[in-house]
Image (tube, rainbow, N blue to C red):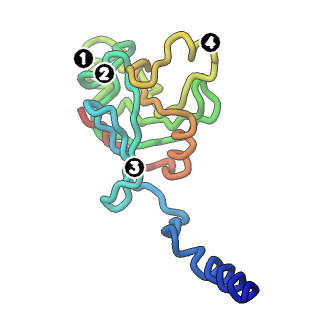
Amino acid sequence: MKKYLFFYIITSLFLFANTTSPPKSKGLKADLVTVVKSQRKMYLSCKGKILKKYDIALGGNPVGHKRVRGDQKTPEGKYKLDYFKPNSSFYKALHISYPNRKDHQHARKLGKSPGGSIMIHGQPNNREIKKSFFQRYNDWTAGCIALENDEMDEVLHLVNVGTPIHIKP
């Protein structure tokens, strides 16, 4: 009787082991990244369905669209994630295609540079810098979008270079 009961339990575990959790989608990639600055949220979506949601930090002066270098604003509008930067001052980064032609024109009218090097990135690589100014829920970047390092790894797994990013107020 004990052998039969043991066999039944083991067989049941084996037969139903794969039915307890949903299968993971392999190769599923986001086709859009959306940032809602006022919510401090970033969403990865595919075909209109949200895959992941992240809490983010923005530029130190986040309200309004980035106009010129040094204004500490995170841009607003439609851009692309145009290249991956594995080596930077921050843990991995995806470059945002700011400034576009309209951004250049506006800054030129003001006689200034529009700035650039706006990215989605992880935490500062320099531990002393990280200790001195980083706080998870405060806006601390120079205009970028910041995540935790493990979240940045996840984003890089789900987002390809060339993916559109919409940054909303």
Disc 1 residue crowd, few under 14, some 14–19, many 20+, Cα 10 Å: few
Tell which circle, 4 or 1, labels the residue nearer the N-terminal end: 1
Tell which circle, 3 or 1, labels the residue nearer the N-terminal end: 3
Residue at image mark 3: 44
Q: The residue under label 3 is which amino acid type? A: Leu
Image mark for residue 128 = 4
Is mark 4 in CB contact (under 8 Å) with mark 1? no
Q: Quadrant of residue 14?
A: bottom right
Which one is in front, 96 or 24?
24
Residue at image mark 2: 62
Residue at image mark 1: 109
Tell which circle, 3 or 2, labels the residue nearer the N-terminal end: 3
Residue lying at the far front of the rendered structure: 1
Q: Position of residue 50 (x, y in %)?
A: 35, 54
Would you place residue 39 above or below residue 12 in this image? above
Q: Position of residue 94 (x, y in %)?
A: 51, 38
Say which of marks 2 and 4 sits in front.
Answer: 4
Label 4 element class: helix
Label 3 element class: strand
- Relative to 45, is 85 on the left or the right? right
Q: CA distance from mark 4 to mark 1?
A: 39 Å
Q: Position of residue 165 (x, y in %)?
A: 36, 43
Tell which circle, 1 or 2, labels the residue nearer the N-terminal end: 2
Say which of marks 1 and 2 sits in front.
Answer: 2
Which one is in front, 85 or 111?
85
Label 1 element class: helix
